[in-house]
Image (spheres, rainbow, N blue to C red):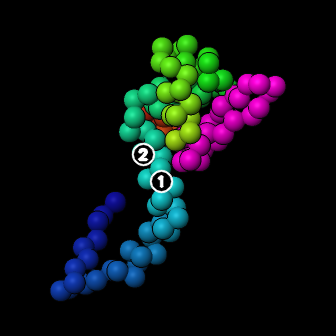
Amino acid sequence: MKLHRSCCEGISHIADIKKALLSDEEIVKLTYIYKALSDPIRVKMLLALMDYEICVGEMSNLLGISQSHVSHQFKILRRYEIVTFTKDKKMSFYRIINEDVKKILKIATKE
């Protein structure tokens, strides 16, 4: 693909560039994904959730970290709209709801 030059003192392509940009809302959602993936614990959690719904206690056992730390990380992932949970009696089972995150992880892990 040939790159086009855009310059304030020559040929400007600002109109075309603006059309190609994501909306502010889409950019915020994109940055949330990369914020989530910037933490190794959250990446491990997301990799574990690729094919499973997992409760906090099970994730804690899997990663060898406290349940409060797992809960805190899940809270961040929920705020970023990457995971959600389903209640089953006293337990909350978490799962990935952002399919783009799954795609990124599959590409990054070469699955």
Q: Mark 1 points at which residue?
A: 30
> Could you tell me residue 64's position as x and y percent?
48, 14
Identify the residue at image location x=62%, y=24%.
56
Residue under circle 2?
A: 34
Left/right of residue 49 with respect to residue 32 in the rendered view: right
Q: Residue at x 30, y 64 (%)?
A: 2
Question: In the depicted view, which residue is nearer to us: 46 or 11?
Answer: 46
| Residue 51 position by quadrant | top right
**Residue at far right of view:** 89
Q: Badge 2 local density, few (<14 within 10 Å), some, or many (20+)?
A: few
* Picture layout, residue 59 above or below residue 87: above
Residue 98 location, quadrant? top right
Q: In which quarter of the image is the N terminus?
A: bottom left
In the rendered image, residue 73, in percent from the top left (x then y), is placed at 51, 34
The residue range painted magenta reads 77-101
Residue 108, label in figure: none
Residue 110 visible somewhere in the drawing: no
Q: In this view, does 20 lie above or below 47?
A: below
x and y percentages locating residue 91 in the rendered image: 73, 25
Q: Do the residues labelled 1 and 2 touch (CB within 8 Å)?
A: yes
